[in-house]
Amino acid sequence: METKVQIVIMSHLSDVQELQSLCRRNADPSKVVNAVFSDAEGPIHERASHKLNFVKFLILRYPNTLDKINPDKEYEDFIKKHPNL
């Protein structure tokens, strides 16, 4: 199913906001220095970084965010081209 790039970007940025919120709820900044918060899907900061990197990939590839794409195919391409991000 094709979706506008801007919708995919906004969805991923919303996910990052939610992940940040999870970290804030679980951390007392006065007591935590280098905490790694995890859930069932792994370290939250790594997932947030991964989503942000995918957003950057889309912005560079599609300057016109009104273009329609298949997000699953784009994600597969992102993983193939950047397996360590």
Image (cartoon, helix red, strand yellow):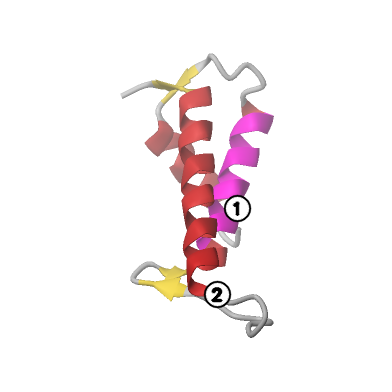
Q: Is residue 44 visible?
A: no
Q: Main secondary structure of the magenta part?
A: helix
Comparing 58 with 11, the one in front is 11
Q: Up-down: is 23 above or below 3? A: below
Q: Up-down: is 22 above or below 32? A: above
Kind of residue at badge 2: Ala
Q: Which mark is residue 27?
A: 2
The residue that appears at 64% across and 31% down in the rendered structure is: 59
Sort mark 1 into few (<14), some (14-19) or many (20+) by Cα contacts within 10 Å: few
Q: Up-down: is 24 above or below 66? A: below
Residue 17 screen position, x and y as percent: 53, 49
Residue 72 screen position, x and y as percent: 38, 38
Q: Which mark is residue 38?
A: none
- State which mark lies toward you, 2 or 1: 2
The reply to whether the magenta stretch includes residue 44 is no
Q: Secondary structure at mark 1?
A: loop
Q: Earlier in the sequence, mark 2 or mark 1?
A: 2
- The residue most toward the bottom is 31
Residue where numbered disc 1 is placed: 82
The residue that appears at 67% across and 21% down in the rendered structure is: 63
Write down the quadrant of residue 58 in the picture.
top right
Kind of residue at badge 1: His
Q: Give the residues in magenta.
A: 47-60
- The residue most toward the left is 1
- Quadrant of the snapshot with the N terminus: top left
Residue 31 screen position, x and y as percent: 64, 85
Write down the quadrant of residue 73 in the picture.
top left
